[in-house]
Image (cartoon, coloured by chain):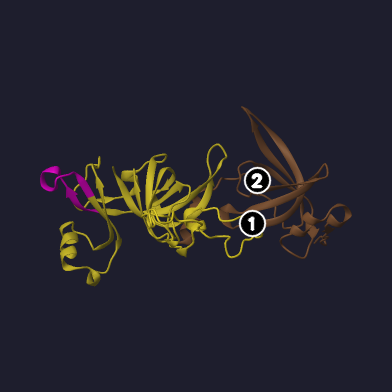
Chain colours: A brown, B yellow
Amino acid sequence: MDELIQYVGEKTGIAREVNLPDFRAGDNLTIKLKIREGSKERIQSFQGDVIQISGTGKTKTFTIRKISNGIGVERIIPLNSPAIDEIVVNKRGKVRRSRLFYLRDRVGKKARIKERRTSKK
Amino acid sequence: MQGLIGRKIGMTSIFDEEGKNIACTVIEAGPCVVTQVKTADNDGYDAIQVGFGEKKEKSTTQPLQGHFKKADTTPKKKVVEYRDCELDVNLGDVLTIESVFEEGDGVNVIGTSKGKGFQGVVKRHKFRGVNDATHGQHNRQRAPGSIGAASYPAKVIKGMKMAGRMGGKRVKVRNLYIVKMLPEKNLLLINGAIPGHKGSFVIIEK
């Protein structure tokens, strides 16, 4: 039965020209989203930390959090969304869990994520 | 009315042309076999009877075995009638989703809802309960309250909403539509949720 759901995903997904980069929880991303206002389309970017990746297959989503004017803002974005124009990975984060909900209770310096530096090969 | 019998596979979501994310239920519908064509002259009304789902011959009664043999097919688990069908079909025809539906068609779907067991009034009838744990409440948070007056009528009127078995009933959901069809695997994607657990039979009518 699950194979059939998977089959539906393969048949209904959008064909993306540019592959999205790999990222995980703790990474800092800039997401460029296509926003339609009336007949016009423009790009809006959203920069923040990934605090959760959830789901599988074509219904996979990620939650991204930023602090805007002192207020925490979170967006849940489906990875397969046609509204995504581009994803840029700004910084890789070093975290010890896959869901970073503890960040919600932290402000200021405590809400920072250490950078994960990888040696270039 | 026309339609097919199917099996609920599960739920997923897809994006439409406008970029909207639509939650939909995947149904494996058909191929169904026409097991009987009823006519007004013969049976008093016009209808077609279709069957779906394989069944062992040894667990089929002989009268039913004969019935399926007439349509030149194997015994079927689920048999449904569609009255006043607009399709031109004959006995033994195989109906696939392509021959019955088109993308965007409005449909109603019938299924057997998930059994919930013995449930109280708050869950079963959406009673509000007592939203207060203090002010003299003890064991009363989810109680039904009064069920009627006293010496007159001196009985509880019939149909009073009380605790009891919930779910496991035939439920029809109306005004759904077909989001997408995948004929090569007999799959229908219908918007929204559909009653029943995965693998259960559902009846789709157009």
Quadrant including the N terminus of chain B:
top left
Residue in the picture at 26% in, 47% down: B82
Residue in the picture at 58% in, 65% down: B139
- Could you tell me the amino acid type at mark 1? Asp
Range drawn in magenta:
B34-48
The residue sitting at the top extreme is: A39
- Could you tell me the amino acid type at mark 2? Val
Element class at badge 2: loop
Crowd rating for badge 2 (residues with CA inside 10 Å; few <14, some 14–19, many 20+): few
In magenta stretch: residue B174: no
- Which quadrant holds residue A30? top right
Choose between A44 and A11: the one closer to the eye. Answer: A44
Crowd rating for badge 1 (residues with CA inside 10 Å; few <14, some 14–19, many 20+): few
Residue B27: horizontal and vertical position, in percent?
A: 41, 53
- Residue B1, numbered circle: none
Left or right, B42 with respect to A51, comes to: left
The residue sitting at the left extreme is: B41
What is the total number of numbered labels drawn onto the structure image? 2
Residue A112 visible? The answer is no
Residue in the picture at 21% in, 60% down: B73
Residue B125: horizontal and vertical position, in percent?
A: 47, 54
- Residue B132, numbered circle: 1
Residue in the picture at 79% in, 56% down: A105
Element class at badge 1: loop
Q: Which chain's residue wears label 1?
A: B
CA separation, marks 2 and 1?
Answer: 55 Å
Residue position for label 2: A18
The residue sitting at the right extreme is: A109
Choose between A75 and B164: the one closer to the eye. Answer: B164
